[in-house]
Amino acid sequence: MLKGLFITGTDTEVGKTVVAAALMHRYRKELRLRYWKPIQTGIEQDDDTAIVRRLGECGDDEILDEGIRLKRPVSPHLAAKLSGQEITIEQVYKTLMTNADQNVSWIIEGAGGALVPINDSEQMVDLARMLSLPVLVVASTQLGTINHTLLTIESLRKRALIVAGIVMVGESNAYNREAIEFYSTVSVLGEMPRFSNLNAESLGSWAHGELDQDRVLLDHLKLAHHPQLNFKP
């Protein structure tokens, strides 16, 4: 059994990692949370696990620092090929089962967007399907976000995944928010600014004051699901 959320984005660098850290602030007093990024590329430049540890003020028991770690900030399938490796969902599954804990609710962050390739036949959305967790979509507020967000949600729904909500990142844009909510029928659960001084204190303050005020995500975090390795991508 697995409890938690899977975080995907409409693009790379859209803000998934910071949103993950914000969720740690928002709900750690009510649940045992653990963050995990199963696949990380460009590890020589960025370490999203370390960022969540710092911004989320996470203890060792709130972080799983294991998984596939590859050099070069490119798509996972390409980073693996350049490293002479192949990534499979089965690898991720084995790591998850080794660290399974029925008392923990996971915050699991995907790499890039939903349709980013993992290998020649599997995409990031297939990892979400394997985990069987509700998906939180992180989207930009900028021009083009309506199309990107609706396409992401459409891709998730085609694979029978639950879309738990959307967090928009950037300068507030009421028109884009309203359009996304209307055409997707998914609620925007927070609008996170690009912080001029991003640190644990400023992020925690925003999370407690602005993120998921109706506690929609809390309900999703409490529900148990069955990971399913044996499915057809």
Image: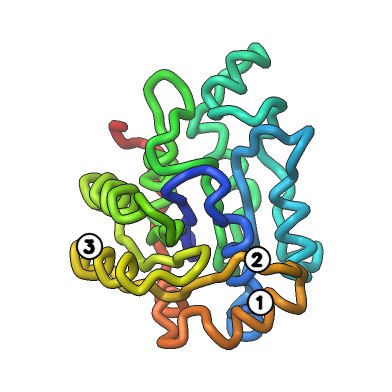
SS for tag 2?
helix
* Residue occupied by mark 3: 184
Mark 3 or mark 2, which is nearer the start of the sequence? 2
Q: Is residue 217 above or below residue 38?
A: below
Indicate which label's residue lies in the foreground, 1 or 3: 3
Camera-side residue of 225 and 26: 26
Q: Amino acid at mark 3?
A: Ser
* Residue occupied by mark 2: 21
Q: Is residue 16 left or right of residue 6?
A: right
Q: Amino acid at mark 1?
A: His
Q: Is residue 158 left or right of residue 116?
A: left
Disc 1 + disc 2, Cβ < 8 Å? yes
* Residue occupied by mark 1: 25
SS for tag 1?
helix
SS for tag 3?
helix
Camera-side residue of 71 and 45: 45
Colour mode of the rendering:
rainbow
Q: Amino acid at mark 2?
A: Ala
